Image (cartoon, grey):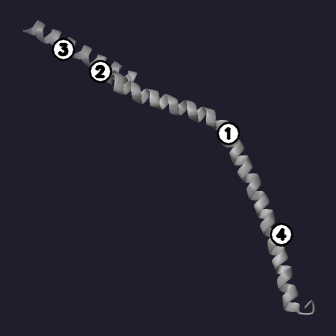
């Protein structure tokens, strides 16, 4: 059986392939552990961000005011003030 060169070469190739696969599996396990460790660092932040998002969504359901940004309200107030000034000017002219 050991005299068959083809069989010996095939077994040698299989052994080399097995060693390469084992090396790649060890590398993959190392990378997986590293990714899981890094992901664990962000779990608390992700949880807080998720809670904040859900609170904001619920606030919008509570009162429509919470659907708009402060910038929107300030722009709206500015437009209302401009409208009031224009009305006063028109009233003075008439």
Distance from disc 3 to disc 2, alpha carbons, whole Å, reads 15 Å
Query: Residue 87 at x, y = what percent?
Result: 16, 12
Distance from disc 1 to disc 2, alpha carbons, whole Å, reads 43 Å
Distance from disc 3 to disc 4, alpha carbons, whole Å, reads 84 Å
Query: Residue 23 at x, y = what percent?
Result: 81, 63
- Residue 68 at least partly seen: no
Judge the density around disc 4: few (<14), some (14-19), many (≥20) Cα neighbours within 10 Å: few
Q: Mark 2 points at which residue?
A: 76
Mark before the other along the chain sequence, 1 or 3: 1
Q: What element carries label 3?
A: helix
Circle nearer the viewer, 1 or 2: 1
- Residue at 68% x, 37% y: name it: 41
Circle nearer the viewer, 2 or 4: 4
Quick one: 8 or 76, which is closer to the camera?
Answer: 8
Query: Residue 68 at x, y = what percent?
Result: 36, 26
Judge the density around disc 1: few (<14), some (14-19), many (≥20) Cα neighbours within 10 Å: few
Q: Is mark 1 on a helix, strand or loop?
A: helix
Distance from disc 1 to disc 3, alpha carbons, whole Å, reads 58 Å
Judge the density around disc 3: few (<14), some (14-19), many (≥20) Cα neighbours within 10 Å: few
Single out the residue that lies furthest toward the bottom. 4
The image quarter in which residue 65 lies: top left
Mark before the other along the chain sequence, 3 or 2: 2
Q: Name the residue under label 3.
A: 86
The image quarter in which residue 40 lies: top right
- Residue at 51% x, 30% y: name it: 51
Quick one: 87 or 1, which is closer to the camera?
Answer: 1
Identify the disc placed on residue 40.
1
Circle nearer the viewer, 3 or 2: 2
Query: Residue 84 at x, y = what percent?
Result: 20, 12
Quick one: 18 or 91, which is closer to the camera?
Answer: 18
Q: Mark 4 points at which residue?
A: 19
């Amino acid at each position: 059986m050991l005299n068959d060169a083809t069989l010996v070469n095939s077994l040698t190739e299989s052994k080399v392939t097995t060693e390469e696969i084992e090396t790649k599996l060890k590398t993959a396990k190392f990378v997986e552990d590293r990714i899981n460790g890094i992901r664990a660092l962000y779990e608390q932040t992700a949880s807080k961000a998720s809670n904040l998002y859900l609170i904001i969504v619920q606030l919008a359901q509570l009162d429509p005011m919470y659907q708009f940004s402060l910038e929107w309200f300030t722009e709206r107030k500015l437009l209302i003030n401009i409208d009031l000034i224009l009305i006063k000017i028109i009233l003075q002219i008439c």
